[in-house]
């Protein structure tokens, strides 16, 4: 009996969550895929009509804007957050005295909800209330910083707020990575008289490759799922200049009663996530099998 | 008595109470009137319902201009347990009817003679394939221009009766350093201005062809180009900081004299009134240039429900909603005018009188038109597609020719 239990209890304990994930994640992915092939409007319908929703989607200029924004925002958000995070981590790694305090300060934005971040930055970047009006108030009358209300630049304000929020978190990841590098190697390098910059660039950073990958995956999926930040900061505006795929999907599903179209956009978003995550999983699994 | 018999007895007792006793009219009402004045208005209806022996179950769902309520409704309908009555409006009523979930309230409508007291085009929204399926609550006029009386007097500006006069007045105000048009850069506000301009430029027939029939020739016509040209002018009349501003803040700009005009539905009147301003003295309400009247009518759609209590509740609710007393009290609170035309307007303000007179006149000459920006003229997918183009044009330097092309394409794509 006890042997039987030993063999089966772990399975039994895992079974409920396994079933729940199977149903609520993969089951609903299949459901969404199905609905995306139908002409569903207000309520889901199940008669498959082919890829018409995808045709409509790729024909829509608003979806084009949303995808472009995703690539601009995603690329800048990931690169800048990682660069800034790494820089902060390296600076903090120099055995500064108040490291604990500084680390908390940098990490704190992550504790805020994106809605708070978005609202605060909306006020800071608003030309009539924030930076522009303050600097004009100091006498620089010709100063302009109206990215938030300029359709061509509004997406960069989302990047600014996103980076502010996430770079502290990336810093924490990198700091942990820096600390995990073997002290002996670093000391050996120092004894050999290798300059600090070179120690970082040739020894420490390359040995942190897995951390880079984790940071990239975390940031990439944050970028693709971004919704609340845009809603709070710009509401998708001006016009729909800062729409992202997630806000597009929300508008179609909940404001316009166009569930089929929303489902097709959700499927495309998922494929973008897969395009990033699958190679990662593949490399991870292969590394373990070797 | 064993446990089993006790359970059986209770079950039987329950069964008997649910089938036998008619507990009186019952209604579960899903609505999104949750802000101050609106909540007060609903309370009036609740009280009246209770006074007539009914039991009201309130189901307010706030947020997203009704989006959240519609999501709740979808979940309830999919689970086979629809609310008795739901705040729905415009073609969404017919859209739900096509899903086969709306009830027929023709009996009440005919007994109460709705057809005689409602303007024909508004009554049209309440019917699903000939049967009555919804009850109208109010009529908001959307194509209003709200103006600051003092600013106009100081700058010696007469009320504009054409868009040319509006442009001339705006240019004069610009020269005097006043923002001509208070506006909030949210897509629905862009659409609100657009439809007022479109009604003026296209005329009522053209408006109907473009935004009700979605006629491609009208959507790509020169008049539509002229509409976008005027929108480009309007863009020049707003201040630099308009993006994302809420409509009530724009109203406040008119109140404070920072701006001269705002184009907004008559919910803006509530803001003026709440600030103690007097219509005709502190602020002026005039219809936007052009003949016609754009309406936004709130209504309750009745869903198919099981049980005599709920059906009775539905009938009672429909009767009360269109009843004279409720139409008066509710609309006094909400700032709109009654949907039925035989309610005394003695207690209403001058803007409401103007609105009612214009509604009667435009009803007579066929220029009473549904507001596209507020979901009265077409279904969500199409109106959303048009709004995308309108807001993209307004917020960029897109040419009118490109906008017209994009408009036709977007409408075709949304079908």
Image (cartoon, coloured by chain):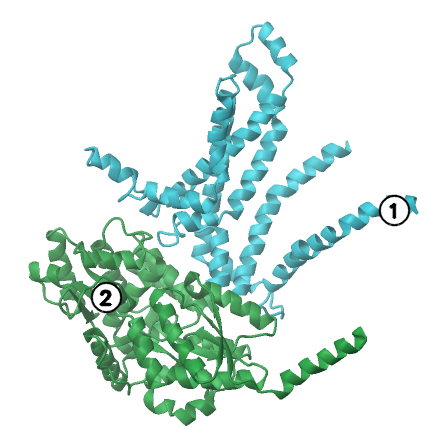
Q: Which residue is mark 2?
A: B273
Q: Residue at x 37, y 64 (%)?
A: B35
**Viewed as shown, does residue A51 lie left or right of A164?**
right
Chain drawn cyan in the picture: A
| Mark 1 crowd level (few <14, some 14–19, many ≥20, 10 Å Cα) | few
Give residue A198's position: percent from left, percent from top: 54, 14
Give residue A208's position: percent from left, percent from top: 61, 25
Q: Which residue is mark 1?
A: A5
Q: Are circles 1 and 2 on residues that touch, CB within 8 Å? A: no
Q: Could you tell me which secondary element the residue under label 1 belongs to?
A: helix
Name of the residue lying farthest toward the front: B1
In the rendered image, residues at marks 1 and 2 fall on the same chain: no
Q: Residue at x 10, y 52 (%)?
A: B176
Q: Is residue B92 visible?
A: no
| Mark 2 crowd level (few <14, some 14–19, many ≥20, 10 Å Cα) | few
Given residues A136 and B17, the one toward you in this image is B17
The colour chain B appears in is green
Q: Is residue B124 above or below residue A183?
A: below
Given residues B331 and B97, the one toward you in this image is B331
What is the quadrant of the N terminus of chain B in the image?
A: bottom right
> Badge 2 sits on which subunit?
B
**Viewed as shown, does residue B114 lie left or right of B22?**
left
Q: Determine the image quadrant of residue B321.
A: bottom left
**Viewed as shown, does residue A121 lie left or right of B61?**
left
In three-dimensional space, the C-alpha distance between marks 1 and 2, rounded to whole angstroms, equals 74 Å
Q: Determine the image quadrant of residue A188.
A: top right
Given residues A155 and A110, the one toward you in this image is A110
Give residue B158's position: percent from left, percent from top: 10, 66
């Amino acid at each position: 009996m006890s042997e039987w239990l030993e063999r089966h209890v772990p399975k039994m304990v895992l079974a409920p969550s396994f079933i729940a994930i199977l149903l609520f994640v993969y089951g609903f992915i299949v459901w969404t895929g199905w609905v995306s092939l139908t002409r569903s409007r207000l309520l889901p319908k199940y008669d498959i009509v082919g890829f018409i929703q995808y045709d409509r989607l790729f024909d829509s200029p608003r979806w084009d804007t949303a995808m472009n924004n995703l690539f601009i925002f995603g690329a800048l958000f990931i690169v800048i957050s990682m660069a800034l995070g790494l820089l902060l981590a390296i600076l903090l790694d120099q055995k500064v005295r108040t490291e604990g305090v500084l680390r908390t300060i940098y990490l704190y934005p992550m504790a805020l909800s994106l809605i708070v971040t978005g609202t605060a930055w909306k006020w800071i970047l608003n030309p009539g209330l924030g930076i522009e009006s303050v600097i004009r108030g100091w006498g620089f009358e010709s100063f302009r910083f109206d990215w938030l209300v300029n359709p061509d630049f509004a997406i960069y304000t989302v990047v600014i707020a996103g980076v502010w929020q996430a770079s502290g978190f990336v810093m924490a990841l990198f700091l942990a990575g820096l600390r995990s590098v073997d002290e002996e190697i670093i000391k050996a390098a120092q004894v050999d008289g290798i300059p600090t910059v070179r120690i970082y660039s040739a020894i420490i950073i390359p040995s942190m490759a897995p951390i880079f990958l984790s940071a990239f995956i975390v940031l990439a999926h944050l970028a693709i799922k971004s919704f609340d930040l845009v809603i709070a900061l710009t509401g998708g505006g001006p016009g729909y200049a800062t729409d992202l795929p997630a806000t597009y999907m929300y508008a179609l599903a909940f404001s316009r009663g166009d569930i089929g179209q929303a489902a097709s956009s959700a499927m495309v978003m998922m494929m973008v996530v897969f395009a990033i995550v699958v190679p990662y999983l593949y490399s991870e699994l292969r590394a373990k099998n070797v | 008595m064993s446990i089993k018999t006790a359970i059986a007895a209770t079950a039987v007792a329950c069964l008997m109470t649910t089938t036998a006793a008619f507990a009186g009219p019952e209604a579960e009402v899903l609505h999104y009137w949750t802000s101050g004045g609106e909540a007060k208005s609903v309370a009036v209806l609740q009280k009246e319902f209770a006074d007539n022996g009914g039991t009201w179950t309130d189901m307010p769902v706030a947020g997203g201009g009704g989006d959240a309520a519609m999501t709740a409704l979808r979940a309830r309908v999919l689970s086979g347990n629809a609310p008795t009555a739901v705040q729905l409006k415009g073609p969404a009523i017919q859209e739900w009817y096509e899903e086969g979930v709306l009830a027929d309230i023709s009996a009440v409508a005919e007994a109460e003679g709705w057809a005689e007291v409602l303007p024909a085009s508004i009554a049209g929204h309440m019917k699903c394939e000939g049967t009555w399926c919804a009850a109208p609550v109010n009529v908001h006029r959307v194509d209003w221009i709200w103006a600051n009386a003092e600013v106009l007097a100081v700058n010696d500006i007469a009320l504009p009766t054409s868009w040319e006069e509006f442009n001339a007045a705006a240019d004069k105000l610009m020269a005097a350093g006043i923002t001509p048009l208070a506006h909030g850069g949210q897509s629905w506000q862009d659409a609100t201005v657009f439809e007022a301009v479109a009604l003026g430029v296209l005329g009522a027939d053209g408006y109907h062809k473009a935004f009700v029939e979605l006629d491609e020739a009208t959507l790509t016509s020169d008049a539509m180009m002229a509409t976008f040209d005027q929108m480009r002018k309007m863009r020049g009349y707003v201040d630099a900081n308009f993006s994302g501003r809420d409509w009530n803040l724009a109203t406040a700009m008119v109140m404070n004299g920072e701006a001269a005009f705002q184009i907004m539905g008559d919910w803006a009147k509530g803001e003026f009134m709440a600030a103690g301003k007097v219509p005709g003295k502190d602020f002026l309400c005039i219809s936007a240039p052009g003949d016609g009247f754009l309406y936004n009518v709130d209504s309750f759609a009745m869903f198919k429900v099981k049980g005599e209590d709920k059906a009775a509740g539905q009938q009672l609710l429909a009767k009360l909603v269109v009843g004279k007393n409720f139409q008066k009290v509710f609309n006094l609170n909400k700032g709109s005018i009654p949907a039925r035309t035989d309610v005394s307007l003695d207690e209403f303000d001058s803007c409401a009188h103007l609105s009612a007179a214009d509604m009667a006149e435009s009803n007579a000459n066929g220029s009473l038109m549904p507001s596209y920006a507020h979901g009265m003229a077409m279904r969500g997918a199409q109106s959303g597609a048009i709004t995308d183009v309108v807001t993209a044009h307004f917020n960029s330097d897109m040419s009118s020719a490109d906008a017209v092309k994009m408009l036709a394409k977007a409408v075709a794509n949304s079908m």
